[in-house]
Image (cartoon, rainbow, N blue to C red):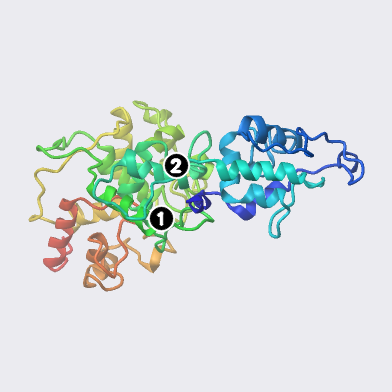
Amino acid sequence: MKKYFLLAELSIIGLLIGISACTHTPEDMASPTTNQINPPFDTISCDSSNVSYPGTVQPILDVYCISCHSGPVPAGGSNLTVYSDVAFLAQSGLLLGAIKHLEGFQPMPQGGDKLAACEIALIEKWINDTTFVLPPDTTDCDTNLVTYAGTVYPIFQANCLSCHAPPAPEAGIDLTNYSNVAFLAQTGALLGAISHNEGFSPMPKNAPPLTSCEIQQIEKWINDTTFIPGGGGGIPCDPDTVYFQNEILPLLLSSCGIAGCHDPITAEEDIVLTSYYYVMQSGVVVPGQPWESEMYEAITDFDPEKRMPPEPAAPLNSDQINKIYTWIAQGALNNHCEQLDCDSVNVSFSETIFPIIQNSCYGCHSGPSPNGGISLETFNDVVAVGSVPSGSPGSLLGAITATAGNTPMPYNAPTLSDCNIAQIRKWIEDGMPAN
């Protein structure tokens, strides 16, 4: 079962290089004949009858390793005063490989003598006798009772939290926060990453992929979970209210929270705009005060070097800017609604279709270098992709309905509502009129 711990999101190569980062002056380095370090144990009698972490392993680490691997910036990022760091190195084979000076491992202690055979044997016995926390046994792959707390989160603990947990989660993605996990699950980013699908950063990073069973269990949890409350009539949309989940988030994901800008991986200027949690955490919005909000200031700036989205992307139009202004002025709430009176009969390009395209697609598919070479800036552009049958490359309807053969769109964002899809389908079936 120890093989699972190689899945932790740490680069072993990077770790080995980092471990060797602690340098020593010649006078600090013990020579083979004048070793100044006093072993913490009698290595002649070498009593291995009562080996424990605090009584045996930790004293050895304190003598030989803590000078480099402790403090605010421990070598290789491994703080050997922290049990979880020691446990990871032990389970992954790195600790034993380093102190045994095995081929392929950085010999430890750095620049000093190899540990005594007794000290190595005591550490090895502790590793072999210790039952570390393991992910669920997926041998039989039970998907009958998959829950977040009992199934999904333990997988994260074993494979992801070494990187994606406080105080400084990598790429700003904290997988101890359920709202973050829910967002990644809804957008398809979680499943895309762990399945190593094209267009997603493969996870765990620099480690073997999750087992097929673990992926199946996470996928089942996603498919069986209702993330946004609904049913029972839901929350009807008020025409005088701007809703974050329905109107603001799709706009941000299309225009700002994209690769190379304010997505969790790039996090330009430490700002991430891919969820309500990240928007508020980034501090770019002051609820109730649009003019004091950095977000509103950026989208209305006349200086092309400061304006967001930056050139060559198209600026937000007045309707989109007004939506963001109103949303902030109304308190910048994490609200949503359901279109209970969806009109998929009286559909026009200017009033129905193009606003959907602008809010959900324009950020990626505009400018001089649109994603996939597909521009959606003009009526003719939209007609061109609307004319392609579902399942064929470049199909608008195929993309928004996630048809086999098409890349699901919007990319890395929630799917369009059933109402919006029905409206686009109706417009296409009507011959895509320029109304």
Q: Position of residue 306 (x, y in %)?
A: 50, 44
Mark 2: give few (<14), some (14-19) or many (20+) Cα within 10 Å. some
Q: Mark 2 and mark 1: span between their CA atoms? A: 14 Å
Instruction: Classify residue 12 as left or right of residue 261.
Output: right
- Please tell me which residue is depicted at 31% across the width and 51% down the height of the picture: 217
Q: Earlier in the sequence, mark 2 or mark 1?
A: 2
Residue shown at the point (38%, 49%) measured from the top left? 137
Which of label 2 and label 1 is nearer to you? 2
* Residue 157: mark in rendering: 2
User: Circle 2 — which element?
Assistant: helix
Mark 1 burial class by Cα count in 10 Å: few <14, some 14-19, many 20+ = many
With respect to residue 299, does 223 lie above or below? below
The vertical placement of 394 against 270, above or below, is below
Q: Quadrant of the C terminus?
A: bottom left
Total marks shown come to 2
Q: Are marks 2 and 1 in contact (CB under 8 Å)?
A: no
Question: Is residue 334 in view from this perspective?
Answer: yes
Q: Given the image, on which type of amino acid does mark 2 rest?
A: Gln
Q: Position of residue 237 (x, y in %)?
A: 16, 37
Relative to 335, 152 lies left or right: right
Quarter-of-image position of residue 232: top left
Nearest to the observer: residue 350 or residue 47: 47
Q: Position of residue 1 (x, y in %)?
A: 47, 51
The residue labelled by disc 1 is 194
Can residue 317 be seen at all in this image of the molecule?
Answer: no
Q: Nearer the viewer, residue 224 or 314?
A: 224
Which labelled disc corresponds to residue 352? Answer: none
Amino acid residing under circle 1: Ile
- Could you tell me which secondary element the residue under label 1 belongs to? helix
> Which residue is nearer to you in this view: 350 or 249?
249
Q: Position of residue 390 (x, y in %)?
A: 22, 70
